[in-house]
Image (spheres, grey):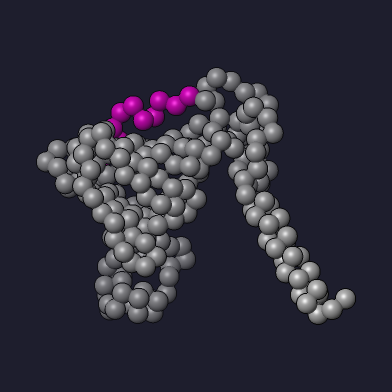
């Protein structure tokens, strides 16, 4: 077998390996009608194991009916409807949330590592935006009945710019999208992120780092 043939076989083998790996990395199709999450199980899997005693209530949730409290530091609150609130969502790859904002309220910069988000404004007027990995900001003011999308894993925010309360419904293509607020992740982590990391990152002194920690630490 000549050298060129060897090279072709190696390339074909690499392509097949990449092709098969893409299948392994993808979500699998459902193998049954439902897999209601057994939230009390001690078994650790990528998601939740299925429980056997399924009921209609496993697919129902009324937790987004009423506005959530907004008398906090940011003037906003998120009410999640994910797999932990609706066990019947297990393996279905979707979830929702309601976000309520006081006047001037902010849902501060954060990411959802496992989901793309689409937001529908119920009431009010929001300044929304996301930032790409090239530090490009895409921002827009959206009003009641309008929609905006935040790509998976990118830093984004929403701010109420109206004179009254605002609210929105967010949908995710994950049963558990995860939320990581950037400021909390850096200044309220346990154990703490070392001062030298934060002072060099933000070009501030230790006293400012300590001040940020005291403000963002869980109450």
Quadrant position of the N terminus in the picture: bottom right
Establish if 202 lies above or below 67.
below
Question: What residue appears at the point 76 percent right and 75 percent down from the top-left corner?
Answer: 7
Residue 201 lies left or right of residue 57; in this view the side is left
Q: Position of residue 94 (x, y in %)?
A: 49, 37
Residue 74 shows up from this direction = no
Is residue 134 or residue 5 the one in the foreground? 5
Specify the quadrant of the image occupied by residue 50. Answer: top right
Residue 69 lies left or right of residue 63; in this view the side is left
Extreme top residue here?
A: 56
Q: Position of residue 205 (x, y in %)?
A: 28, 79
Q: Position of residue 145 (x, y in %)?
A: 25, 33
Establish if 40 lies above or below 152.
above
Residue 190 lies left or right of residue 105; in this view the side is right
Q: Is residue 104 magenta?
A: no
Residue 163 lies left or right of residue 52; in this view the side is left
Q: Position of residue 99 (x, y in %)?
A: 31, 40
Q: Is residue 65 magenta?
A: yes
Specify the quadrant of the image occupied by residue 31. Answer: top right
Please give the range of residues in magenta: 60-74
Is residue 138 or residue 14 the one in the foreground? 14
Question: What residue appears at the point 31 percent right and 70 percent down from the top-left corner?
Answer: 210
Residue 204 shows up from this direction = yes
Is residue 171 or residue 213 the one in the foreground? 171
Q: Main secondary structure of the magenta part?
A: loop
Question: What residue appears at the point 30 percent right and 28 percent down from the top-left corner?
Answer: 66
């Amino acid at each position: 077998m000549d050298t060129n043939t060897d090279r072709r076989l190696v390339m074909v083998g690499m392509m097949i390996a990449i092709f098969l790996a893409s299948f392994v990395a993808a979500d699998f199709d459902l193998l049954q009608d439902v897999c209601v999450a057994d939230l009390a199980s001690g078994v650790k899997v990528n998601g939740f194991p299925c429980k056997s005693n399924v009921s209609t209530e496993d697919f129902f949730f009324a937790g987004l009916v009423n506005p959530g409290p907004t008398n906090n530091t940011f003037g906003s609150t998120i009410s999640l409807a994910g797999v932990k609130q609706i066990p019947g969502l297990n393996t279905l790859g979707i979830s929702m949330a309601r976000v309520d904002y006081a006047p001037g309220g902010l849902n501060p910069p954060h990411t959802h590592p496992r989901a793309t988000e689409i937001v529908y404004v119920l009431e009010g007027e929001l300044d929304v935006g996301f930032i790409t990995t090239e530090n490009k900001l895409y921002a827009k003011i959206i009003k009641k009945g309008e929609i905006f999308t935040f790509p998976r894993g990118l830093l984004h925010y929403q701010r109420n710019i109206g004179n009254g309360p605002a609210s929105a419904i967010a949908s995710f293509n994950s049963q558990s999208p995860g939320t990581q607020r950037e400021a909390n992740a850096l200044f309220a982590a346990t154990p703490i992120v070392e001062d030298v990391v934060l002072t060099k990152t933000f070009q501030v002194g230790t006293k400012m780092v300590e001040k940020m920690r005291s403000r963002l630490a869980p109450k």
